[in-house]
Image (cartoon, rainbow, N blue to C red):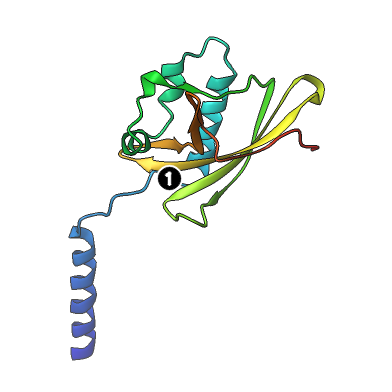
Amino acid sequence: MKRISLLLFVVSVLYFAGCTAAPERISLLNNISAMEKVSLFLEKMKESEATEPKLMAFISDSLMKVRNLSKTELKVNRFYPDYIKVESAIQDPEAPAGMVVAARIGGVKDVWMHRLYFKVIEEGNSLKLLPGGVSAGYVDPWIRSDLFIKE
């Protein structure tokens, strides 16, 4: 009887301790959210009327700050695809805090097809793209590109 009482007491204490513990911050970043972010970016990139500020909103602010760059002085390197297919997302093997998303884009009747790889990170309360490079006034929003691929 004493063992049962002691067991119930221990279980009760552990249960209530778990209920009152402060919840950890839940990460926004997972495979699905990373793929959705890339899909939104590619859809926006596809629009001919998409303005640079709309595209730059997807780019990491912290990276721009570290490199002492201004979003207003840069343009986003872009394609105008007729179709988009976000294929997969995996945890970045080099940086566990990020996801690498692969997407295929192409032109009419597969005249051209590219596979682009994006790095998605959590920055504050939102997900951002970590660009692969900045040169000649343009930001490459992808970290790698395989150009003119065959299916």
In the image, taking residue 2 as reference, residue 60 lies left or right, namely right
Residue 1, visible in the rendered structure: no
Q: Spot the residue most to the bottom.
A: 2
Q: Secondary structure at mark 1?
A: loop
Identify residue for label 1.
29
- Tell me which residue sits at (41%, 18%) in the image: 53
Image coords of residue 60 (percent x, y): 39, 35
In the image, taking residue 130 as reference, residue 146 lies left or right, namely right
- Tell me which residue sits at (19%, 84%) in the image: 6
Q: Quadrant of the N terminus?
A: bottom left
- Tell me which residue sits at (43%, 45%) in the image: 29
- In the picture, residue 10 is in which quadrant? bottom left
Image coords of residue 13 (percent x, y): 18, 72
- Tell me which residue sits at (77%, 19%) in the image: 108
Above or below, 70 against 130 in this view is above
Residue 104, visible in the rendered structure: yes
Residue type (three-letter) at the residue carrying disc 1: Leu
Instruction: Give 5 or 25, whichever is nearer the viewer.
Output: 25
